[in-house]
Amino acid sequence: MKFFKNDGNEHIKANSPQNISLKNILKEVDIFPTQDEFECYFIGIINDKNEILQFTRFERNDWYLDFPVIVDGNYSHSLQFDLTTKQLKEIIRKFFRGEDWRTLIGNTSSK
């Protein structure tokens, strides 16, 4: 898995993501700042299927997940969800392992 981020301390661009382990991306989630701590923040992960999940942290236990949907190689639309930290971590685990993470968003609010 690869990741990109801007957390106020480090900016890894989406067009040049870095490799990261599951253990380390979950650590990134734990330490990621809220919107009150840093305004222009984001973190994203890219799996082996070249799918991208992007997320931001509003408050300690309040995340916003954005999943860009690509159709025929072009951006079509985006699925967006509000999540708790626990929900986000479980989605990341499944995303990392190539499992169907979408089943976990059935109980969340989509925008």
Image: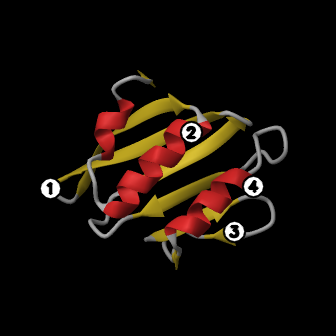
Q: Is residue 33 left or right of residue 27?
A: right
What residue would you read off at disc 1? 72
Q: Position of residue 100 (x, y in %)?
A: 26, 47
Q: Name the front one of labels 2 and 1.
A: 2
Screen quadrant of the C terminus: top left
The local crowd at label 2, few if under 14, some if 14 to 19, many if 20 or more residues have their Cα within 10 Å, is few
Q: Position of residue 87 (x, y in %)?
A: 50, 37
What element does badge 3 sit on? strand
Q: Is residue 88 left or right of residue 53?
A: right
Identified at 33% across, 26% down, the residue is 106
Q: Is residue 32 left or right of residue 80?
A: right
Q: Name the front one of labels 4 and 2.
A: 2
Q: Name the front one of labels 1 and 3.
A: 3
Q: Quick check: 111 above or below 48?
A: above
Asked if residue 72 shows in the view, the reply is yes
The tag earlier along the polypeptide, 4 or 2, is 4
Quarter of the image holding residue 102?
Answer: top left
The tag earlier along the polypeptide, 1 or 4, is 4
What residue would you read off at disc 4? 31
Identified at 85% across, 45% down, the residue is 37
Q: Position of residue 53 (x, y in %)?
A: 44, 52
